[in-house]
């Protein structure tokens, strides 16, 4: 039985060690809307939010925690040999150009277009789960988290379609 | 001298700013970003952008609305679009007209739509 992300978040000392622990699970963790809410609750226990003079650094940690889990579920959609490359790209848009160049050389455009399609579907599935979360700050962190993954997938699509490499 | 239209992105999440900038730059715009409402307003005054894309919740829960009111007072001709995480209720509850937003894009943003819309404003 895998550990819940909320337990993992409470156990790890900071969001970076949480991210490493999530990656070590290899996508084997429950991640329905109730699990997202529990993770969000654990995050807000450590980093309470407020309406005025909000702490930008802590808010970014919330997006990062959500992204760590979302990325691990999303990359399950592609061949294990390419998961690290997609993880790297989803972590940092600047890495998209170089990583796609390497993947094109090794796997070819057709495979990457198929990856793009299954990743789009995977993110859409995760977004549908996020949509089940009641409106509020937990949902806001997850929407912020997944939005950047959609953006990066759009950039990947631009690279695959255009002569930008 | 570039004839690319300048887009200012104002959002407290640097990852979002970087990815939106990558999409806009790759689509023929000249994008820059600021990571708070305060810095966004300063960048707006310094760089004179053609279009602004602005988050709502930054240092304050309604920072985007506050600075949009100011930007629309100083340069009413500049379109300012809200990038919202709050959901469908935003457009009706936040009050686009009250703050002066030209439109709202829900996150995750549909960039085919966003590029089509701001492309019309950029002509």
Image: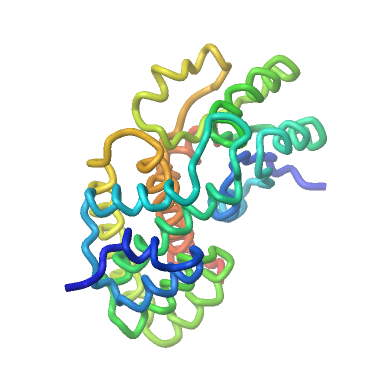
- For the residue pair A17 and A66, the one nearer the viewer reads as A17
- For the residue pair A139 and B83, the one nearer the viewer reads as A139
Colour pattern: rainbow
Percent x, y of residue B3:
74, 43
Q: Residue at x 68, y 39 (%)?
A: B5
A46 w.r.t. A94: above or below: above
Q: Quadrant of residue B11?
A: top right
Percent x, y of residue A160:
44, 67
Horizontal placement of B87 versus B32: left or right? left
A148 w.r.t. A132: above or below: below
Residue occupying the far left of the picture: A1
Q: Residue at x 40, y 33 (%)?
A: B86
Q: Quadrant of the C terminus of chain B?
A: top right
Q: Residue at x 48, y 42 (%)?
A: A48
Q: Residue at x 52, y 30 (%)?
A: B82
- Can residue A117 be seen at all in this image of the molecule? no
């Amino acid at each position: 039985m895998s550990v819940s992300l909320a337990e993992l978040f409470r156990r790890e000392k900071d969001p970076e060690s949480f991210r490493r622990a999530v990656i070590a699970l290899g996508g084997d963790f429950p991640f329905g809307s109730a699990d997202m809410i529990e993770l969000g609750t654990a995050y807000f226990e450590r980093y309470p939010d407020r309406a005025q003079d909000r702490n930008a650094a802590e808010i970014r940690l919330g997006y990062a925690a959500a992204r760590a889990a979302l990325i691990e579920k999303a990359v399950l959609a592609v061949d294990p040999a390419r998961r690290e490359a997609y993880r790297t790209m989803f972590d940092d848009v600047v890495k998209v150009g170089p990583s796609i160049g390497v993947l094109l050389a090794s796997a070819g455009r057709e495979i990457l277009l198929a990856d793009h399609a299954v990743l789009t579907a995977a993110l859409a599935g995760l977004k549908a789960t996020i949509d089940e979360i009641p409106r509020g700050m937990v949902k806001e962190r997850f929407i912020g988290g997944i939005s950047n993954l959609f953006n990066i997938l759009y950039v990947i699509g631009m690279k695959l379609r255009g002569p930008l490499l | 001298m570039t004839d690319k239209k300048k887009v200012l992105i104002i959002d407290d999440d640097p990852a979002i700013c970087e990815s939106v900038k990558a999409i806009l730059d790759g689509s023929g715009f000249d994008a820059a970003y600021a990571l708070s409402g305060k810095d966004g307003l300063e960048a707006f005054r310094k760089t004179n952008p053609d279009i602004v894309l602005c988050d709502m919740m930054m240092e304050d829960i309604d920072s985007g609305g506050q600075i949009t009111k100011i930007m629309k007072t100083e340069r009413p001709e500049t379109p300012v679009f809200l990038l919202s995480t709050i959901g469908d209720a935003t457009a009706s509850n936040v009050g686009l007209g009250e703050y002066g937003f030209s439109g709202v894009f829900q996150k995750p943003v549909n960039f085919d739509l966003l590029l089509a819309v701001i492309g019309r404003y950029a002509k």
